[in-house]
Amino acid sequence: MCGIVGVHGHADATHLAQLGLYALQHRGQESVGVVSIDDAGRARAVRSMGTLNDSFGQELAKVPGTSAVGHTRYSTAGSSTIENAQPVVARSRGGFITLAHNGNLVNAGELRMKLEEEGSIFASNADSEVVVHLLAKSSEQPPAQRLADALRQVEGAYSLIVAMGDTLLAARDPRGWRPLAMGQIGDAVVFASETCALDIIGATYIRDVAPGEIVSANGNGVTSMQAFPSTDLRRCVFEYVYFARPDSRVFGGSVDRARRALGRRLAQEFPAPTADLVFSVPDSSNSAALGFAEESNLPYELALIRNHYVGRTFIQPTQAGRDAKVKVKYNPVREVLDGKSVVMVDDSIVRGTTTRGLVALVRAAGAREVHLRVSSSPVTGPCYYGIDTPSREELIAATHTIPEIEAHLGVDSLGYLSLDGMLESVPSGPHGFCHACFSGDYPTAPPTDPEKLKFGCGC
Ligand code: SF4
């Protein structure tokens, strides 16, 4: 999962891109980057590991531009290096190419091998760089055609923002896996992964970039081409369940409304009639817990407090360290939980390690009964389309029955939302969504060599 933003035709484009990245920080905290492009088409990059900070902003102030491309990155294990930080910038015939990518290309390994055999030299091990090399090799013109020519060879998930010369391009793969919104501020055009990034800039949402579409903005205005037919729509349902911010609209629908509907449906499918109250695992489960509480006529309480200042770097290899991680990130409110039968709403369970730690915390704070309700279906398979999920063997729902999971987590009851319930609750559902990690219905052949995915940007 990554966040991308692009601004074209604004005197303060670099600063606007930086602002947009603040709103997309939840989509990636491994590295951050902004490339500003001046009127002469010169691209200058500021990239750094970690999140946006003061020194990043100071560096950025030195590279003003009228167009800018920004990226927040969430990488797969082993590839969290500054070389893989985006946007990617390269210099080729005809000038600079700048690219920011959200997604994962399932044939990146094969393409990279082929390109290397033909003499390409890669500066990173991110799959996104493959597209830059394909762009450099293409002689098609104008830039939108050149991008279409490059993308014709790739398979998988991509929402892209690309700058070439004075043109800023935005593209989505034909299955529409990852979101990409388009907005306007004055005469300037803005693209962003989620509409919360348009809000912070003060841009007005116009529409989504359509699956298979390439939108092109330059001095002549904005043009669009349907580069690829979109015949098999597979928007990632997990964007609604967990990834996107609740104040965003993605795929044309409100994330808050989607999560409340998921919570309401969950309460219908798995009521908890003996419970005194409902609380969420903050923050991504808040809206679903509200929906559950509304549907059940139960009070919604703030029983877990999340510390927002704990970074992803706080990772310990030992069990003691993992237990401490849960405690550092969450603290229960004893006054809410003591002696109560409670419903804990979480958006998903992956390995179960964090959930188990949370249940233990809630019990230690005096909860009499813990009924766990999950606002998505059991995650039973990995994602090959831009999300860093572990292998099947590590997914608790792939290897354990519901009674076994209940016992492992230490809960009195466990209810997962059904696949139909999940797909029918999200806006414009139930069709046109990817649910492969829940159902095993993968729209592409899984990569024959999963090691090749390590080339992935993991966003
Ligand atoms: S496999 Fe799961 S996480 Fe990955 S794109 Fe599909 S629904 Fe989203």
Image (cartoon, rainbow, N blue to C red):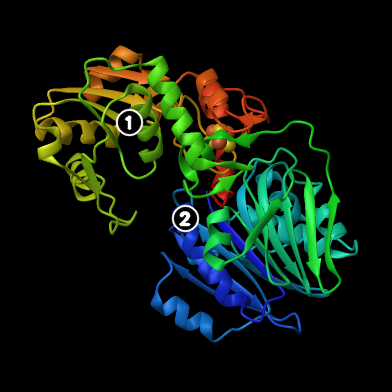
Identify the element where label 2 is drawn.
loop
Residue 1, given in percent of the width and then of the height, sits at 52, 48
Q: Which amino acid, by three-letter code, is at mark 1?
A: Val
Mark 2 crowdedness (10 Å alpha carbons): few <14, some 14-19, many ≥20: many
Sequence order check, earlier mark of 1 and 2: 2
Q: Which amino acid, by three-letter code, is at mark 2?
A: Gly
Q: Tell me the quarter of the picture where residue 304 sits.
A: top left
Q: Residue at x 48, y 60 (%)?
A: 23
Q: Tell me the quarter of the picture where residue 174 sits.
A: top right
Above or below, 68 relative to 422: below
> Which residue is the site of mark 2?
28
Residue 87, given in percent of the width and then of the height, sits at 60, 65
Residue 117 located left or right of residue 424: right
Residue 241 located left or right of residue 100: left
> Which residue is the site of mark 1?
345
Above or below, 88 relative to 160: below
Residue 211, given in percent of the width and then of the height, sits at 74, 43
Q: Nearer the viewer, residue 60 or 313?
A: 60
Q: Are marks 1 and 2 in contact (CB under 8 Å)?
A: no
Judged from the image, the quadrant occupied by ligand 1 is top right
Identify the element where label 1 is drawn.
strand
The answer to whether residue 391 is seen in the rendering is no
Q: Nearer the viewer, residue 188 or 149?
A: 188
Q: Nearer the viewer, residue 193 or 59?
A: 193
